[in-house]
C-alpha cells in the first residue's frame, strides 16, 4: 500500500496541476481571441502603402491576379497604368513563421520605383535597419536583378532576405506585367 | 525580514542579474534597445510574481518528488498567458521578443525564486519577493539596453540624438551585435563590482551558483558547485 | 536533400551558433567552461538531451497538438517533456550505467533550465522542419554549443592566469573574453550560403 501511494500521489498531483493549467490556458486563449488574429494587412492598408512606392500613381486598386506563388501576397495596379506594386514576403532572421513583408513598386519598364517594408519581425536595431529609407533608396531604379545592391553589415541575413525578395518580385513582375499593365 | 526588505533586496542588494548573475540569456538577447529590455523585464516580472504566489499557495500540496516539474508547469502556464496578452494587445513587443518570450519558462531566476523562496514562505512575502526580483531584473535590462542603444544606435528609448541635437558621432554597430552584448554586460558587472568593493562587500566570483535552482543537487556532488 | 541538411547543420554550428549568436545556454557556457573536461562532459550531455528532446517533441507537436489546434500549448508541453525526461535519464543512469552517470550526471539537472534545449525544440517547430531536419538542426545546435564551450574553456584557462585590473577580475573579464570569441564567430557570417548557396 505504502509503495503504491508513493507512486500514485506524485503522479496525481502533477497530472492535476498540469490539467488545471491547460484548462485555464484554453479559456484565456479563447477569451483573448489570439487564435483569430489575422496576420497581415487589409487590402486598404496595402493600397495605402502601394501609393507610396509608385510616385506617379493615379488610383490604385488590388489586381485580380492569381499567381499560385505562396510568397506573392498580392498585386496592386494603377488604373493609369503607370506601374504596379507587388506585395511579397521573404524569410529573414526570424524564420518561416514570421517573414519580412514588403511592397515593391515597379514602373512600366520593370525598374524599381520604391520599396516599403510593411512587416519586419527582425532583431530590433539590427535587422530592422533594412527599413531605413536611406538604405531602401539603393534599390530605386534597379531592374533585372538586385544582386548589385549591397547588404548591410551586421544585418546580413535580413538584408540578403530583402534582396532575395526583390529578385523574386522582379521575376513575378515579368509574369504579371502582361496582365495588369497592358 | 521586514516586508520592505523582502521587496527591496531584489532591486539593488541582491539584483538577480548584476549581483547574482542569473538570467544571462535574456539579459544579452533582448537588450539591443532599452525599450525591448524593459518589455522583457516587465513580462518576466509578471510571470515571477504570479508563479511565486501560486507556488507559495500550493507549497503543501506539491509532493517533493515532482516538485520541479510542478513548478515548471505553473511557470509555463503564466508564460503562455503573457504571450497571449502581448500577442493580442502589444503585437510589436511580441514580435521583437520572439522566441525569448517562450524562453521565460527556463529563466533560472523564476525557478530559483520558486525553489528558494516561494516554496518556503507565505503568499504575501513571496509576491513581494517576486516583485522586487522582477523589478531588479527589469532595471538591469534597462541599464544594459540603454548602454547598447546609445552606443550602437545613437538613440535612447527610440529618440535619435542626431535628430535631437543636430549632431552625433557615427554609432558603433559593434554594441548591437552579440559580441557587443557580452562586452557591455562585462563592463556593467565590473562597475557593479567596483561599487560593491567600495561598500566593503565581496563581489560574486562565479556565475549564478548562489541563486541557481539546482544548487541543492549540485552541492550534493563531490566538490559542490566548484565541480562546474 | 543532402545539401539542405548540410546547410542546416553548418548554419546551426557556425553561423547561428546557439551560444554566441542566439544567446541561448549562456549560464552553462559561463558556468561550466572553467575546465576542459567539464566542458566536454556538459557538451556531451547537451547534445544527447537536445537530440532526445527533439525526437520526442516532434511527434507530440505533429500528431497531438496540431490535429486538435492546440499549437499554443507547445511551450508547456515541451518543457514538461524535457523536465521529466531529464529526471528519468538521471535516475536510469545512476542506477544502471554508473560510469556514464559519473561523466554526465552532474550536468543533467542543469540542463532542464538550459534554454538552448527548449529553444531548439521551439525553433524546429517555428521553422516548420520535418523530423529529419529537426534532428539535424538539434545535432548542429548541440555541436555548436559544445564547440563554443570547448573553445571558450581553452580561452579561460589563459584568462585565469592573466593580470587584469582589479574591477575586471572574475566574471567581467570572462564576459569580455566571451565577447572576443563571439567576434571571431561573426567571421562565419555568409560562410554557409557562400559554400552551399
Image (cartoon, coloured by chain):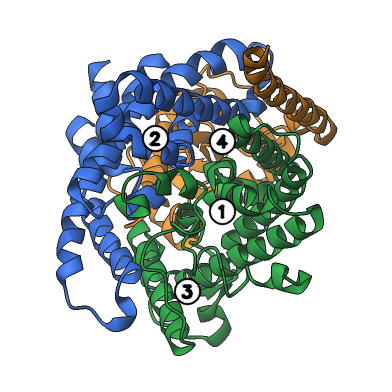
Chain colours: A orange, B green, C blue
Give neighbour class at mark 3: few <14, some 14-19, many 20+ (Cα, 10 Å). many
- Residue lying at the far front of the rendered structure: A2
Q: Quadrant of the C terminus of chain A?
A: top right
Give neighbour class at mark 2: few <14, some 14-19, many 20+ (Cα, 10 Å). many
Mark with earlier residue (3, 1): 1
Distance from Cα at disc 4 to Cα at disc 3: 37 Å
Horizontal and vertical percent position of residue B61 = 75, 34
Q: Quadrant of the N terminus of chain A?
A: top right
Circle 1: element type:
helix
Distance from Cα at disc 2 to Cα at disc 1: 19 Å
Q: Kindly check if marks 3 and 2 are in contact, taking CB atoms under 8 A apart as contact.
A: no
Residue B127 higher or lower than C167, as above or below: above
In the picture of the structure, the residue carrying the numbered disc 3 is B147
Q: Nearer the viewer, mark 3 or mark 1?
A: 1
In the picture of the structure, the residue carrying the numbered disc 2 is C108
Circle 4: element type:
strand
Distance from Cα at disc 3 to Cα at disc 2: 36 Å
What residue do we see at 55% from left, 31% from top?
Answer: C79
The image's mark for residue B109 is 1
Q: Nearer the viewer, mark 2 or mark 4?
A: 2
Residue B122 higher or lower than C6, as above or below: below
Q: Chain of mark 3?
A: B
Circle 2: element type:
helix
In the picture of the structure, the residue carrying the numbered disc 4 is A87
Distance from Cα at disc 3 to Cα at disc 1: 23 Å
Can residue C23 be seen here? The reply is: no
Horizontal and vertical percent position of residue A56 = 59, 50
Q: Chain of mark 1?
A: B
Distance from Cα at disc 2 to Cα at disc 4: 48 Å
Amino acid at each position: 500500500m505504502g509503495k503504491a501511494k508513493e507512486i500514485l500521489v506524485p503522479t496525481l498531483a502533477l497530472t492535476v496541476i498540469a490539467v488545471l493549467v491547460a484548462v485555464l490556458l484554453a479559456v484565456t486563449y479563447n477569451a483573448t481571441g489570439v487564435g483569430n488574429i489575422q496576420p497581415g494587412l487589409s487590402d486598404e492598408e496595402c493600397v495605402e502603402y502601394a501609393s507610396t512606392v509608385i510616385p506617379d500613381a493615379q488610383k490604385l486598386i488590388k489586381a485580380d491576379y492569381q499567381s499560385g506563388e505562396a510568397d506573392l501576397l498580392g498585386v496592386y495596379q494603377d488604373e493609369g497604368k503607370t506601374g504596379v506594386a507587388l506585395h511579397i514576403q521573404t524569410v529573414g532572421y526570424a524564420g518561416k513563421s514570421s517573414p519580412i513583408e514588403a511592397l515593391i513598386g515597379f514602373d512600366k519598364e520593370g525598374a524599381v520605383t520604391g520599396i516599403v517594408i510593411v512587416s519586419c519581425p527582425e532583431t530590433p536595431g539590427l535587422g530592422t535597419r533594412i527599413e531605413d529609407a536611406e538604405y531602401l533608396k539603393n534599390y530605386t531604379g534597379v531592374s533585372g536583378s538586385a544582386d548589385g545592391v549591397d547588404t548591410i553589415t551586421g544585418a546580413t541575413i535580413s538584408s540578403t532576405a530583402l534582396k532575395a525578395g526583390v529578385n523574386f518580385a522582379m521575376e513575378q513582375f515579368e509574369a504579371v506585367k502582361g496582365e495588369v499593365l497592358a | 525580514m521586514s516586508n520592505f526588505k523582502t521587496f527591496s533586496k531584489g532591486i539593488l542588494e541582491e539584483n538577480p542579474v548584476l549581483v547574482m548573475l542569473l538570467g544571462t540569456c535574456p539579459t544579452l538577447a533582448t537588450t539591443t534597445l532599452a525599450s525591448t529590455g524593459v518589455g522583457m523585464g516587465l513580462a518576466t516580472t509578471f510571470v515571477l510574481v504570479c508563479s511565486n504566489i501560486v507556488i507559495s499557495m500550493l507549497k503543501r500540496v506539491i509532493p517533493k518528488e515532482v516538485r520541479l516539474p510542478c513548478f515548471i508547469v505553473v511557470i509555463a502556464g503564466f508564460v503562455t498567458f503573457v504571450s497571449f496578452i502581448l500577442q493580442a494587445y502589444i503585437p510589436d513587443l511580441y514580435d521583437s521578443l520572439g522566441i525569448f518570450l517562450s524562453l521565460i519558462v527556463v529563466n533560472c531566476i523564476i525557478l530559483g525564486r520558486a525553489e528558494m523562496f516561494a516554496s518556503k514562505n507565505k503568499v504575501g512575502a513571496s509576491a513581494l519577493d517576486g516583485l522586487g526580483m522582477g523589478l531588479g531584473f527589469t532595471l538591469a535590462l534597462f541599464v544594459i539596453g540603454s548602454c547598447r542603444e546609445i552606443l550602437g544606435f545613437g538613440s535612447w528609448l527610440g529618440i535619435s540624438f542626431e535628430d535631437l541635437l543636430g549632431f552625433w558621432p557615427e554609432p558603433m554597430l559593434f554594441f548591437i551585435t552579440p559580441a557587443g552584448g557580452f562586452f557591455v554586460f562585462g563592463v556593467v558587472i565590473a562597475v557593479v563590482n567596483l561599487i560593491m568593493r567600495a561598500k566593503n562587500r565581496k563581489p560574486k566570483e562565479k556565475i549564478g551558483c548562489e541563486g541557481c535552482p539546482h544548487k541543492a543537487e549540485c552541492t550534493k556532488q563531490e566538490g559542490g558547485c566548484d565541480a562546474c | 536533400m543532402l545539401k539542405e541538411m548540410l546547410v542546416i547543420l553548418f548554419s546551426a554550428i557556425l553561423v547561428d551558433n546557439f551560444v554566441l549568436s542566439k544567446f541561448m545556454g549562456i549560464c552553462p557556457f559561463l558556468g561550466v567552461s572553467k575546465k576542459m573536461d567539464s566542458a566536454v562532459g556538459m557538451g556531451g550531455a547537451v547534445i544527447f538531451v537536445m537530440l532526445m528532446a527533439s525526437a520526442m517533441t516532434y511527434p507530440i507537436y505533429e500528431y497531438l497538438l496540431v490535429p486538435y489546434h492546440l499549437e499554443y500549448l507547445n511551450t508547456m508541453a515541451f518543457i514538461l517533456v524535457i523536465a521529466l525526461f531529464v529526471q528519468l535519464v538521471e535516475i536510469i543512469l545512476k542506477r544502471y550505467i554508473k560510469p556514464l552517470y559519473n561523466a554526465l550526471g552532474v550536468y543533467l539537472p542543469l540542463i532542464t533550465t538550459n534554454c538552448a534545449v527548449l529553444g531548439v525544440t521551439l525553433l524546429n517547430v517555428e521553422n516548420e522542419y520535418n523530423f529529419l531536419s529537426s534532428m539535424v538542426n538539434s545535432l548542429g545546435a548541440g555541436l555548436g554549443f559544445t564547440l563554443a564551450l570547448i573553445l571558450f574553456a581553452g580561452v579561460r584557462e589563459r584568462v585565469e592566469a592573466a593580470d587584469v585590473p582589479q574591477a575586471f577580475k572574475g566574471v567581467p573579464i570572462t564576459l569580455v573574453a566571451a565577447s572576443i570569441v563571439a567576434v571571431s564567430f561573426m567571421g562565419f557570417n555568409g560562410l554557409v550560403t557562400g559554400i552551399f548557396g
